[in-house]
Image: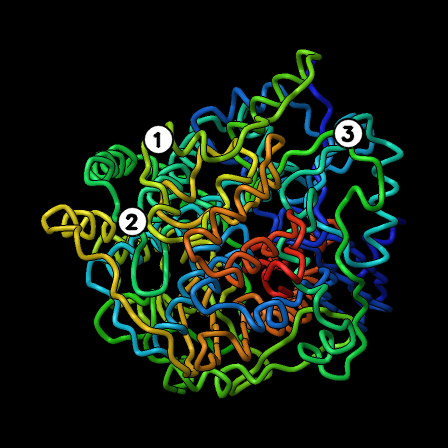
Amino acid sequence: MPLNHLPPMKRDYSLDIRHLTRVEGHANIQITVRDGELLDARWAVVETPRFFEVMLKGMSAERVPFLTSRICGICSISHSLASIRAVERAMEIVPPVVAEKTRLLAMHGETLQSHALHLFFLVAPDFAGTSSVLPLIQSHPELVRAGLQLKELGNEISTVTTGRCTHPVSLVVGGLSKAPDKQRLLQLQAMIQERKPALESACAFLLSLTIPDFSRETEFISLSNGSSYPAIGGSLVSTEGVVHDESDYLLMTNEYMQEGSTSKFTRLSRESSVAGALARFNNNSHLLHQKAKEVAESFKLKPVCHNPFMNNIAQLVECVHILEDAEELIKTLLDGELSEIKTSFASKAGAATGAVEAPRGILYHHLEIDEKGKVVKADCIIPTTQNNANIHFDLHALVQQALREGKNDGEITKLCEMLVRSYDPCISCSVH
Amino acid sequence: MKLKIASFDFTCCEGCQLQLANSESTLTDFLELLDIRNFREISSERLDDYDIALVEGSISREDEVERLLKIRKQAKVLVAFGTCACFGGVNSLKNSFPLDETVREVYGDMVIETLPVRRISDIVKVDLSIPGCPVAKEEVERIMVSLAKDSIPTLPKYPVCVECKQRLNTCLIELGEICLGPITRAGCNAVCPTGKTACLGCRGPAEELNMPAFLELVKERGLSLSDLQEKLAFYNAFEPLATDET
């Protein structure tokens, strides 16, 4: 009798995935079950560290966003803006309104691109039972086309607002180095209209899928500003009722080291917590655009949702919100003058935190700057770092549930991989 | 014949391999050229019978050296893909700090293995370099077509300035800012100066390079040499200025 047909009480099972595929960066999953008992379930990040906090030392504050954007190839705009916010707060620089609106639009583009990449390229193959998106080009052409259209739209929004979709060019301390071109904003407006059906068909496809039924109660952390769905700056809040000022990010993160992992772990009120689309939704769903609320309802997604697989759906809901909000932002930019884009400033000493909602969750950059405008100390805390502990404890609970349900080895392996992917981990970013 | 290709990443942000999935409107045609054998970020399939290896990132740990040597053995064409692979990239900024202090600053007393950052060509023979932070997808497409047609792919020899002039931009140096456009290899369509920020030289030195004249220009305009030094060091793609020059 093959091992995986033994009754759950007697089972042995081990999983040792080195360099999990279809995620950004390098990490391993190791699980050991003996005689039906879970001995170990481990999430280990083995990515090579780059030491950005050290590289930043002595760098001119104005150059910082160009370096920190290189922390991540997927969320470079968020890193750039977290640094810019930290510098501007440290030096008491207030950017012009046009710059603020353009930055928000840039973040929308990045999040749309990132969510589309995740949902269509990394997650969809799990549901279709293929090893990658490539076979889906033949088997699910409309789905792939919808995914590509949305990803392209996200990239185009980022390009129009920042000059380039990866590693932004025109986001600078004080505002923008160049205003977005009105002609291209007009084209974007048309492109958004044209691509809404792609998002609708994506919603229909995801509605047809069965999301794994698994929940483990945890704490969700995000930004919150009380008036709009969070993106740049605000209070730090959790679903356990914790509220802190942006500057008190260390009280929210409590980083610690984990043996065998080059990425740190964090905690707040419980053994673990979560950042990301589901955390933003759980804390701010009332601030979503009406259409996004309707999509959430169609998936029966309600706050506080503790099923990590629903992070995929929260991302989809955010895509709907982004298209609506981006349209409004573009309209405002087109209706106004785009001449005042940068506040001039003189360097001065200071220290401050910049927090933004990167696609994968709350991102903190803290910078201390001396009177010559050079960085003395830097600290970056990445969303995936804040999800490591939760992934770790979820793996325990998920394997135990799967053993109780009598799932076979292949099914358990697939569920574990899908669980990790649903967090959309950005591993090289978390190690930085 | 499709190109049997694999993509690997080392110490980096993975932004260059992500460009492969960009330019969505031409993506399915681009993929027609390729038979993707191994690409961890997008596929669970891992096959070892590839001809072309795109290698992204720099090298900063011993296990990376071993992985890279294995890739070199298999690949007929090993491509240093992006600025980190070609020059070490921003990661090289770490090399100006003592390693033990670097680890302590980030990890305290925990033991973390890390080596000084090296470029791919410091470890193995590189057959082809595609610089850029990130790489420009149009250039990657052009080079892949060359490889598929068995012709020799080339990079522009002239500096970014040529492309910048073609785009009718106002020169940033004229506006009082040091821009590395005059000394950096073109091929990016001058994307940074077009966005009114200085070129930081991610594509490395142009082949037709006149460094003394550039230095003279910076001095003549009374621009900051320490700013120039910071810019030249940013991607580790240029020699630092001699101390008597700063």
Q: Quadrant of the C terminus of chain A?
A: bottom right
Q: Which residue is mark 2?
A: A178
Labels 2 and 3 within one chain: no
Query: Viewed as shown, does residue A345 lie left or right of A304?
Result: left
Badge count: 3
Residue B41's spot in the image, x, y percent? 64, 44
Answer whether residue A204 is visible to the viewer in this image.
no
Compare residues A236 and A350 and report the one nearer the observer. A350
- The kind of residue on which mark 3 rests is Asp
As measured in the structure, the alpha-carbon distance from the residue carrying label 1 to the one carrying label 2 is 15 Å
Quote the CA–CA distance across marks 2 and 3: 38 Å
Residue B106: x %, y % from top left: 67, 76
Q: Residue at x 35, y 78 (%)?
A: A91
* A334 shown above or below A264: above
Given contact means CB atoms under 8 Å apart, are the residues at marks 1 and 2 in contact?
Answer: no
- Residue for badge 3: B127
Helix, strand or loop at mark 2: loop
Q: Quadrant of residue A429?
A: bottom right
Q: Which of the two labelled residues, at mark 3 and mark 1, occupies the earlier sequence position?
A: 3
**Residue A326: image location, x then y, percent:** 25, 50
| Residue kind at label 1, given as amino acid type | Arg
Q: Nearer the viewer, residue B193 or A40?
A: B193
**Residues at marks 1 and 2, common chain?**
no
Residue behind mark 1: B167
Q: Classify A22 as above or below A11.
A: above
